[in-house]
Image (cartoon, rainbow, N blue to C red):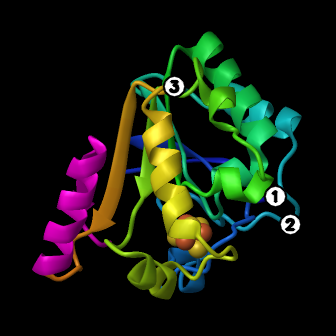
Amino acid sequence: MADILYTYKNQVYANITNKCDCRCTFCIRSHEDSVGDAKTLWHKTDPSLEEVIAAMDAFDFTGYDELVYCGYGEPTCALETLTASAKYAKEKYGVRIRVNTNGLANLYYGRDIIPALAGIVDSVSISLNAPTSEEYDKVTRPRFTGAFDALLQFASECKDYIPDVRLTIVDVLPQDKIEASQALADSLGITLRIRKYA
Ligand code: SF4
C-alpha cells in the first residue's frame, strides 16, 4: 500500500485518494511517484477509513500542530474518509485540519458539501491557478464545464463555514496574471497565497 501519512518540510500530510477530476498540466503526479519521506503516493486502491485511522495511530504527531489533506489526488473525492478521519485526528491528536483542494467538490457531487466540513476543517486552501475561466481550463483541464465559476462560488461559500479560506496560485504566472488573480481574490474578500513552484 502507498503511504497514507507522509511528511514534507516539517508538515504532515494525508494522502487519502488518487481520484481527481482535473488533469493539471503542472501536476507532480505526472513526473514523480512520491513527495517528502513517502516511498510512493500511488495507492493500489484508495485506503479505507480504518486504514487511514490506523496510519494516524501509527504516526507520532509530536511537534506537528496541523494535518494537511493533500496527496496524489483531490481529497474531497474521498469526502467521507476525509471528514471522519479529520474529526478523529482533531479529537485524538489535537491537530488543526487543513484541506488543499481544487474547490470543485460541489460539482463533483452535484450538491453542496461545504456544511460537511464545518467544525472539522480549520483551513482550506483552494487552487485558483489562473485569473480567468479560459486560462483556468487550459492549465487545470477539469472534467466539468463551468469549473472556474464553481470554484469561485465554493471559495465564497467556504467563508461561511471555515475560519481560514485561501485561494492559491503559483509564482510562475506572469506578473499581469498574478495581479489579475489578486484583484479577483480581493473582490471575493479572500486572501490570495502565491506559492513557490516546486
Ligand atoms: S487538482 Fe491536484 S491532484 Fe488533481 S490534477 Fe490538479 S494538481 Fe494534480
Quarter of image, ligand 1: bottom right
| Tags 2 and 1 touching, CB below 8 Å | yes
Residue 161's tag is 3
Numbered range of the magenta stretch: 175-198
* Secondary structure type for disc 3: loop
| Tags 3 and 2 touching, CB below 8 Å | no
In the rendered image, residue 26, in percent from the top left (x then y), is placed at 45, 82
Q: Is residue 59 visible?
A: yes
Count of labels in the image:
3
Q: Earlier in the sequence, mark 1 or mark 3?
A: 1
Residue 1's tag is 1
Q: Which quadrant of the figure has residue 34?
A: bottom right
Distance CA(mark 2)–CA(mark 1): 6 Å
Identity of the residue drawn at 62% across and 35% down = 114
Query: Pointer 2: what residue?
Result: 44
Q: Does the stretch in magenta take in 5?
A: no
Distance CA(mark 1)–CA(mark 3): 34 Å
Which amino acid type is shown beneath numbered disc 1? Met
